[in-house]
Image: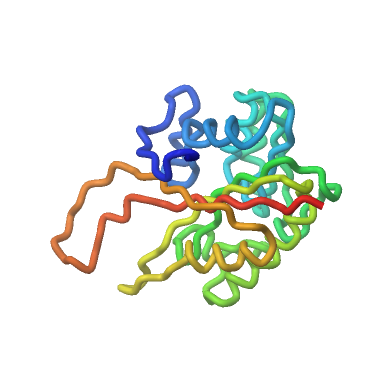
Amino acid sequence: MGRSSWHVLQGEDPAYALPEAAGQCGWVSQLRPLIVEMSRPGDVVLDPFAGWGTTLVACAVESRKGIGLEVSPERAEQAQKRLREYPGQTMLCADARTPPLPPESVDLVLADLPYFGTNLDTRSTVEGQFYALRDYDAYLSAIDEAFAAVTKVMRPGARAVLAVQNRRLAGRFVPLAWDVARVLGRHLTLGDERIHCYDRPVSDDDPMLTNRSHEYLLVAAKEQA
């Protein structure tokens, strides 16, 4: 058998915590095991939705060459400042749908997707800001376009790990993770799913509601030539 399909996260390593981005960026401690498992030292790791640059910090710690794309100029600048302490990492202000990278140059794609329906950057006028998309079909189309482009810069056999959570919006369940998996499967071969669990208290007795304390990691690979 392979790896366990679920993992309970214990929190961020204080050495890499970013208080000003609490709730907006992933944990270095969450990403390091995935990087070690899915790539080798010296490999190129791409995060097409790099945000605060957390994936690149994890790459630096694990001796990988991280490349991050962030469409928001302000956020990209903030991430670049954070990464000054981590030489060898590259943060670009760029759209995931048009990654400025050579074909077949990436060994691993690792990203936390910009979730549909959040309150982040809803009024952004930046072209390519997925958070600002309010129509679900338009959002999925943008994700599809991004995956099509990202697949082209992955080498044959390269893997991708995408973190995404189903959502509850306006009292309705939105199967975001499952819809994204269908889109991802158009471009890469889906391998399996994993589940990361967070310690969140339960605060409601309604049997139709849960504390939504887990997210899916969709694991896929580009077919060998």
Q: Position of 49 compared to 5: left or right? A: right
Which of the 4 quarters of the picture holds residue 7?
top left
Number of callouts in the render?
0
- Residue 97 image offset from top left, x and y in percent: 73, 61
Residue that extends furthest to the left in the rendered view of this protein? 205
| Residue 22 visible to the viewer | yes
| Way the structure is coloured | rainbow
Question: In the orientation shown, which residue stands out farthest toward the front?
Answer: 1
Residue drawn at (62%, 38%), measured in percent from left and top? 79
In the image, residue 124 sits, relative to residue 91, either above or below, namely below
Q: Is residue 172 above or below residue 15?
A: below
State the residue in front, 161 or 145.
161
Residue 82 at least partly seen: no
Observer-nearest of 35 and 193: 193
Q: Kindly identify the residue that appears in the image at 73 percent across and 55 percent down.
A: 150
Residue 80 position in % (x across, y down): 67, 36
Q: Residue 62: give x, y in percent of width and height.
A: 62, 25
Q: Nearer the viewer, residue 171 or 182?
A: 182
Residue at 49% x, 43% y is 25
The residue nearer to you, when weighing 33 against 80, is 33
**Residue 73: percent from left, percent from top:** 68, 50
The residue lying furthest to the right in this view is 102
Q: Residue at x 59, y 57 (%)?
A: 190
